[in-house]
Image (spheres, rainbow, N blue to C red):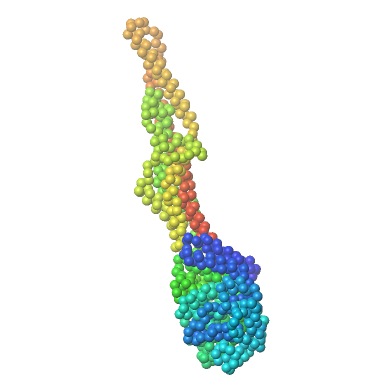
Amino acid sequence: MKLLKRRRNAVSLDGRLEGLAEAADLADGRLDADAVAGARSVVSRAGVRRSLSIDHTAVALAGATGSGKSSLFNLLSGTGLATVGVTRPTTSTAQAALWRGAGSGPLLDWLDIPRRHEVSPAGAWSGPEAPAGRGVAVASGRGARVGDDAGGPEGRGAVVVPGLDGWTAGDAAGLILLDLPDHDSIESAHRLEVDRLVELVDLLVWVLDPQKYADAAVHERYLRPLARHRDVMVVVLNQVDRLTPAAAERCLKDLRRLLDEDGLAGVPLVGVSARTGAGLPELGSLLASRVADRRSWAARLAADVGTAADALVRASAGAGALTGGSAGSGPGAGATPDAGARSGADAVATVAAPEVSVDGLAGPLTDALSEAAGVPTVVEAVAKAHRHRSVAATGWPLTRWIRRFRPDPLRRLRLSAPGARSSGGPVGRTSIPVTTVVQRSRMDTAIREAAGAASTGLPAPWAAAVRQAARSHGDELEDGLDRAVAATSLGPVRRPVWWRVAGLAQWAVFAAMLAGALWLIGLLGMDYLRLPQPYLPTAGELPWPTLLLTGGILLGLLIALLSRVAAWLGGRRRARGAARALRASIGQVARELVLEPVAGELSRYRRFTEAVTVARNGDGG
């Protein structure tokens, strides 16, 4: 079951490259530009390498001045192509020896190797790629020869190295052997050429010598940063013939210890002598098996993807990049300082995005934005407007006309009547008082707190991105709040039925009062003219004219008083409804302009962690 689960969760190289490309896109503008550019470069480089010949394996011999890599190149190729030097650099540009190199031209063009030499089964030049006019050192089909000059022409005590018989003829088919310049050359162009090719070749063979095998330049600049590339790396300790067997054994053990500390545990370590041929059969067999496998190119790309993903994770965590011997350059750029101890893959762990509910952040933010938008002023105006309109509709007819000279509280704020907002119509600016300094400060504080709560536990670069996202629409916020208030329906359109009933009642009692007043005026006129008094009906002992007049006045005042109480209660109810509607509108603005960008940034980080985990570990589960 465990095996089936591992197979099901394993991610192909294509999947890892897609994950790295997605992680780089998601990290763009958030993380260090060099880390993002490095990841994109790996994706681009992988696309090119996969389109070239996979039947050929580019193997680079890299080392310091005097390490003997050129001698090994001559010995393995059975030629004298490389000029051998001890105290000063002799290799200025890389050159290639090809075994059955048909179809490797585009690959060598991509590697930018102009000096190409086809090695025939007998070790002689062959094919159109052999340079004209150059001398050829022939490697016999029965074995490679070494001599006192460690790779010079035959003679001068040359001996045949047993075990390499037939290696150049068949087992190395598809091998492209490169001799690189010295990585510690005094010429900067040589070092740059090494750095360039170390990033491109399929298999790296590091040639060290007993004098400088522990040199920090090679360990800190190359070996340690390339810890993920252990599957496409071979380390050779050359010149073991200069040591006694016991001393050679001690050097190999010490070198193994250094490699383990660099995170290169398990990397093949071979002690050889280009002078005596010791260890060369083992090295030849190792290279032949890697070439025959035809998978070094894929392992190299997988290691590149993992290294680039590690760099993104370190940039995400805010960790500094290790640049090795020269800042900002070389294959070690972007590697973790302790990659050797922890193999580079687990040096910095990705941090899971916090599970933050946007709704949970909306409450305090909406409160602050509501105050800044003048919602309390609008809610108070809704209550006052309801009372104002209620008095105008139900007040005493003799005094209600005075209300016409008082401005409507909502219209004073350039807000429509409750419920009169037409959907889809243009929304103008309101006359709500401008946001005060205190309100703006509270709004800014609420935005910062919401962003802080959302980014709790995130790595520093992503937390900064979340905070920036929260304020990304700061210039639109005040206008958005004003439009939200202006567009909010503040209540029902229809006037309450009781307003009409109370209004009719007021007119009825007013008519009764007027009738009683006219009746009494008529009686006073008749008495003044000494006319006979007509019959005057009474209600008990109170004459009807007096009852109509006084009753109309008192009843009108009572209706007006009760209507004011009802208007006050109705105003409170409508104010609460308006507050809910306004809060919902302000909450929508808060979500669109603050919380949704924050949620988008959190989602971006989650997708980044998923993509970079796939690219880093090749594990989809």
Question: Residue 82 location in percent, x, y?
Answer: 55, 83
Q: In which quarter of the image is residue 203?
A: bottom right
Question: Residue 178 location in percent, x, y?
Answer: 57, 79
Tell me the quarter of the image containing the C terminus: bottom right
Q: Could you tell me which residue is drawn at 55 percent across and 92 percent down?
A: 148
Relative to residue 508, is residue 456 depicted above or below? below
Question: Residue 197 location in percent, x, y?
Answer: 54, 74
Q: Could you tell me which residue is drawn at 47 percent across and 45 percent down?
A: 584
Q: In which quarter of the image is residue 201?
A: bottom right
**Count of numbered circles on the image:** 0
Q: Is residue 313 visible?
A: no
Q: Is residue 62 visible?
A: yes
Asked whether 449 or 40 is in front, the reply is 40
State left or right for residue 439 relative to residue 206: left
Asked whether 373 or 126 is in front, the reply is 126
Q: Residue furthest bottom?
A: 157
Relative to residue 390, is residue 365 depicted above or below? below
Tell me the quarter of the image containing the N terminus: bottom right
Q: Could you tell me which residue is drawn at 62 percent across and 70 percent down?
A: 52
Question: Residue 446 location in percent, x, y?
Answer: 41, 52
Relative to residue 264, is residue 457 depicted above or below? above
Q: Could you tell me which residue is drawn at 53 percent across and 78 percent down?
A: 93
Relative to residue 193, is residue 364 depicted above or below? above
